Image (cartoon, coloured by chain):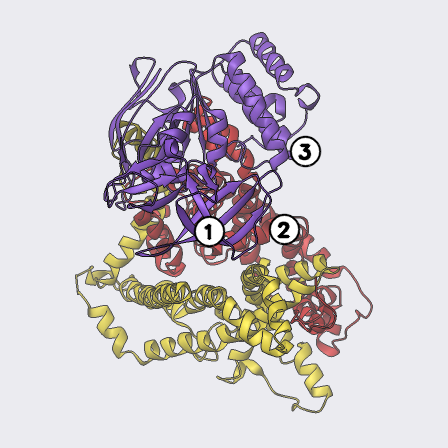
Amino acid sequence: MLVLSDLAKTYPNGYAAIRGVDLTIEDGELLVLVGPSGCGKSTLLRLIAGLETPSAGRIEIGGTDVTAAPPQTRDLAMVFQSYALYPHMTVRENLAYGLTVRRTARHTVAARVAAVAEALDLQSLLDRRPAQLSGGQRQRVALGRAMVRDPKAFLLDEPLSNLDPALRAQARAELVRLHRALHATIVYVTHDQEEAMTLGARVAVMRDGTVEQVAPPLELYARPSNTFVARFIGSPAMNFLTAPVPGVDAPAGTLVGIRPHDVTIDPTGSLRATVDLVEPRGHDTVISLRHETTAGPVTVTAVTGESPLPVGSEVRLNLRHDRVHLFDARTGARID
Amino acid sequence: MRWPHVRTWTPRPAWAGTPLIAALLFPLYWMLVSSVTAESQIFESPSLVPLGPSLDHYRALFDERNFLVPIRNSLIVAGLTTMVTIPVAALCAYALARLPMRGKSALLALVLAISMFPQISIVPPLYLILRELRLLNTYPGLVLPYLTFSAPLAIWLLTAFFRQLPRDLEDAAMLDGASRLRVLRDVVAPLAAPGLASTAILTFLYCWNEFLFALSFTLGPDRYTVPVAIALFRGRYQVPWGEVLAGAVVATIPVALLVFVFQRRIVAGLTAGSMKG
Amino acid sequence: MTGPTSPLERAEARLALILVAPALGVILLVALVPVAATLWEALHRHDLRLPWLGRPFIGVGNFAEALGDPRFRVAILHTVGFASVSVPLELALGLALALTMHSAVRLRTIVRVAALLPWAIPTVVAALVWRFMFDAQAGVLNASLRGAGLLGPTFDWFVDPLAAWVPIIAADVWKTTPFVAVLLLAGLQTIDHALYEAAGVDGASSTRQFLTITLPLLRPALIVAGAFRALDALRLFDLAYVVTGGGPGTATEPLSLFAFTALLQRLRFGYGSALSVTVFLLTFAFALVCVRMLGRSLTEERS
C-alpha cells in the first residue's frame, strides 16, 4: 500500500511543482495519474521513486515511512518514457542488472530472467543490444527489467507514448493482462485521457501540482467534480453554457455542462443553433454549431450518428435532461 | 533535398579550400624534406624535392645526441600525467555534473581561472617547492606541475561529457539498487568511454607538447623532454638545422599517429570543451 | 542545483565532497599555493643576486616600477598588438577552413588530419619549422623571393624589429587556425539546412544567404573561438622564445617573455612576479569583457 500525505515539492527557483497531494494506492491497484503537461504527474512519480526529495509531506510504502529513504532501498521499479535500457549491456544483462546489483544467487537470476523472457516473448532477443531492437521490443525489455525484480510497486512513466498508435493499443492490452496476472500495484502516468480511461481502476486527474479528483473512470465521466475535470475527460470536450439555458432547469448564472454525445439534433429541441463545421469521423460525425445568447455567440459541439448536415443550416438542439451537469460559475465546483 | 532550380548557399566546394589545406600541410612537408637533405644542400639551394636524400641527420640524432632519451622521458611524463589525471578528474567531474554540492559554480570558476593563469608566473614558487622536495630533474617533478593544467582541462572536458549523458540511465540504475559509485562504474563510465578517451588523448598531447615547465624543471639532458631537447640543440658554428628538423620530425610522429587514429575523438573533445554546458 | 536540503541530498553532498577532494587537493597544492606565492612575491623586493637586501615588503613598489619601465610598456604594446593582428586572421582563416571541412565529404579524413596536425604538434616544433623557413640563408621563403627577384640578397627577417614579428604571427596563425576551425565547424553543423532552402525560395542569392544566415548564426561560435584565442594570444611565450628569442633586442618581446627574463635571467623574483601578475590581470580583464559580450549576445538571441 502506497500512501502519500500532504506531499509538496518546490524547486529552489520558487517553482511549486507539487502542492499538497494526498493519495492512497491500494495493493494490486492500477492507478493512473493523468493531466496536461506541466501538471506535475511525472514529478509525483519521481517523488514516489525517490529520485526527487519532497519539500514537505510523507511517503509510506507498506506501512514504512520512506520519505528520507534513497531510491535504492525503496524496492520500486520504474519504466521510463525513454525506456532507459543500458545500451552497453545485452538484453539478458539488462534484465538481470537489478538482481546482480543486489548479489542475488546466479541460478536465481537465471531462472527469473528466463521466466520474464518467456512471459514477454523476449527469448530470442536475450543476446542482443538495445540498439538492435525495435521500439516495441525495447518497451517490453523495459517492462521485463521491472518485472524481474518483483518490486513492491511498478511506476510507469508514459511507457506507451513512444510507440505507434497501432502498437500502442496492443501494448495497452498486454499491460492490463499482465496487471491481472501479477496482481501488481501500478502507478501509471499518461497525458492521454483516453488511455487513462481504458486502463485504470482509478484515475487521478492532476492540474498545477494538485489532484483535482481521483475516482474510477466512469465516475469521472459521469460526475466530474469541477469544470477542469469535466473538460479534460471525454472527447470531444464538454460544452459549457451559462444559465439561463432554454429547456434546462438551472439557477441563473450557473454553468451548465453537457457532453457532445448528449446533445441531439431534434426539431422539437429547445435550443436554436446554426451549423458551423461538420467533421465526419466515419462511425459518427462531430458538428460544431453556433448558438446565440444574450452574451454573444457560443460554440456547441454535438456528436451524432446521422448523416452530416449542410453548413449554415438552422437546427434545433435537445439536451438530455439526465445528463446535464451544473457547476458554480465562480469556483468551477460541481453543484449537486 | 535541394530543388535544382532553387539556389541555396552551400559551403564552397572542397576544391576551393585546397590552397588552404596545402598551406597547412606545406611546412610539415618542408620539414620532412629538409630533414633528409644534406646539411650543405639545405643552405645552398632549397628545393621542393629532396636532392640526394639521406638519413644522416637521423643517424646523428640517435647516435650522437641520444635522442631516445628525451623520447623516453616525454613518453613517461605524458603517460604518467594522463594516468593520474583521468581518474582523479573523472571522479571530480561526475560529482560536479550530477551531485548536489554547495559552491559548485565557484569550483568550476576556480578551475577555469587556474587554466587561465600564465604558466610563467608559477614557475618560481614551483621551482622552490620542487627543490625542497628534491624533485627537480625527476619524473614526479614534472608530473606534479603538469597536473596544474591537465587537471583543470580534464575536469572541464569530463564535466561537459558527463552532463550530456542521459540522466534516465543513472536513475534506472539507482532504482535497480546501485549506489552512486556503482552507477558510475557500471553505467556512466562505459558510456563515457569515448569522452574519457578524448580527454586522455588531449591530455597526453598537451603534456607531450609542453615546453616551459620542462625547460624550467629539468636540469640536464638525461631528463629533457623532446621539446626541450630540440630547442636546445647546439651546433659548433651554427644551428644544426638538419638534426633539429630530424628531431622535429621524430617529435611529430607520435602526434601524427594519434591524430590520424583518433581524429574523431579529438574533434569531439575540443567541441565538448567549447560548449559551456 | 544549489545547496542540499534533505538527508538524502546531504548524503549525496558528502559523497560529492569525497569525489572532488583529490582533484581539489592537487589543484590546491600545485596551482593555488604557487599562485598565492607569486602574488606574495610580487609585493616584496626579492633579488636573488642581492641577497643582503633581504625580502622587504614593498607593497605596490614593483608594480610602480613596472609602470615606469619603458620596456614593460613596450611589452604590453607587443602583446596586445600581436593579439589584435593574429586573432582576426585566425578567425577569418579558421572560418574558411571550417567551411572547407564542412563540405568536404569524400576527402573528409585528409582534410581533418591536415587541419589537426598543425594544432597538435609541439609549439616548439612549429616555432622551429617557421624559424627555419624564414631563415635568411637556409629559409625557403627568402630563397623563393630572391629567385623571383623581389628581395635583396641580404634581407634578414630577424634583424628588422617589425619584420621579426612576421614569422611569429605566421607560426601562431598556422598553428591555431585548425583549433578555430574545429570550434566553428561545430557551429556550422548545427545550422538547419531548411533555413537556406527557405531563403533560396525567397530569392536570396548564395552570397546573401551566407551573409544573412550563416554569419549571424555563427556569431556565438565566433565569439567563443575569438575569446579562447585572444586569451591564449595574450599569454604568448613559447613562440616568441623559440622563433626570435624576443629579438632583435627586445623588439618582439611579449609580456610573458619579459617576465621570464626578469625571473630566470635577471633573477629579480619580486619584480618578475609582479610582471606575471600583470599578465594575469590583463587576461582576466579581457575574460570578463568576453563573458559580458557572450552573455549579451546570448540574451539578444533569446529576444
Please give the residue where the numbered disc 1 appears in the rendered image.
Answer: A289
Among the chains, which one is red?
B
Please give the residue where the numbered disc 3 appears in the rendered image.
Answer: A132
What residue is shown at x 47% (from left), y 27% (from top)?
A: B173
Tell me the subunit letter for badge 1.
A
Q: Where is residue C29 shown, x and y percent of the image?
A: 33, 44
What residue is shown at x 40% (from left), y 37% (from top)?
A: A35
Q: What number of labels is visible?
A: 3
Please give the residue where the numbered disc 2 appears in the rendered image.
Answer: B264
- Amino acid type assigned to the residue bearing label 1 in the image: Leu
The numbered mark, 1 or 3, whose residue comes first in the sequence reads 3
- Mark 1 and mark 3 in contact? Answer it, CB < 8 Å: no
**Which numbered disc covers residue C84?**
none
Q: Secondary structure at mark 3?
A: helix
Mark nearest the camera among 1 and 3 is 1
Assess disc 2: are there few (<14), some (14-19) or many (≥20) residues with their C-alpha within 10 Å of its C-alpha.
some
Instruction: State which quarter of the image contains the N terminus of chain B.
Output: bottom right
Among the chains, which one is purple?
A
Residue B24 in the image: above or below residue C27: below
Q: Is residue B232 visible?
A: no
Q: Where is residue A4 shown, x and y percent of the image?
A: 30, 23
Alpha-carbon distance for marks 1 and 2?
61 Å
Horizontal relation, residue C189 to residue B276: left or right: right
